[in-house]
Amino acid sequence: MAKKIWLSMFVCISLLLLLTGCGIGAKEEPREKVDFTVVSEERRPEELVKLLEQKKTEEFHLTYTDGEALYICVGYGEQPTGGYSIRVQECSMAGTNLYVDTLLVGPESVKDAENTPSYPMIVLKMEQRDVQVNFM
């Protein structure tokens, strides 16, 4: 019986050390802010507008390029009222990775919220770059 307990403890400790050892020494590259512009619907490429119209009812993350610029699109799907906005928490680079974090902000008051559904989305435009986009 004592051998089984010791063997079980040895296996558990070994697994614990093995699992925690993988992250030792792993260092995350520092992230640098990336300049971007929030693009209004009127200034979006026509093809992108059509694509966003198809996806607007569900949450989505999308990248699009027109050969000159990179567009990062985030949509929060159908919301019960108007008055929502989207805040960009982070847009940064580390190596060849682009990190984008946004936050949906609800209406400030009940009277700010129209009683018709809305489809909050944001489109960020930046210089063309070959990156892996990570939505957070």
Image (cartoon, rainbow, N blue to C red):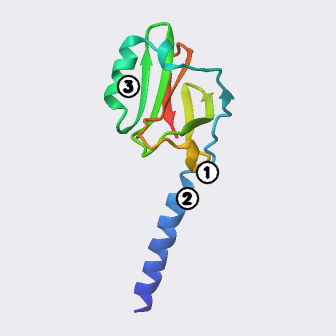
Task: Report the disc number at residue 53.
Answer: none
Q: Residue furthest bottom?
A: 1
Q: What residue type is labelled 3?
A: Leu
Is label 2 in a helix, a strand or a loop? Answer: helix
Is label 1 in a helix, a strand or a loop? Answer: loop
Q: Camera-side residue: 89 or 85?
A: 85
Residue corresponding to mark 1 = 24
Quadrant of the rendered image containing residue 90: top right
Q: Which residue lies furthest to the front in this view?
A: 111
Q: Can residue 135 be seen in this view?
A: yes
Q: Earlier in the sequence, mark 2 or mark 3?
A: 2
Q: Which residue is drawn at 31% across and 27% down?
A: 54
Residue corresponding to mark 3 = 52
**Marks 2 and 1, how far apart in space?**
7 Å
Residue corresponding to mark 2 = 20
Q: Is residue 79 left or right of residue 101?
A: left
Is label 3 in a helix, a strand or a loop? Answer: helix
Q: Position of residue 12 (x, y in %)?
A: 47, 72
Looking at the figure, which quarter contains the N terminus? Answer: bottom left
Q: Which residue is drawn at 42% across and 19% down?
A: 64
Q: Which residue lies furthest to the top in this view?
A: 68
**Marks 1 and 3, how far apart in space?**
42 Å
Q: In this view, does 107 lie above or below 96?
A: below
Q: Camera-side residue: 53 or 63?
A: 53
Q: Which amino acid does label 2 sit on?
A: Thr
Q: Are marks 1 and 3 in contact (CB under 8 Å)?
A: no
Q: Are marks 2 and 3 in contact (CB under 8 Å)?
A: no
Q: Where is residue 51 in the image (x, y as percent from the top left)?
A: 34, 22
Q: Is residue 104 left or right of residue 11?
A: right
Q: Is residue 15 left or right of residue 85?
A: left
Q: Do the residues labelled 2 and 1 touch (CB within 8 Å)?
A: yes
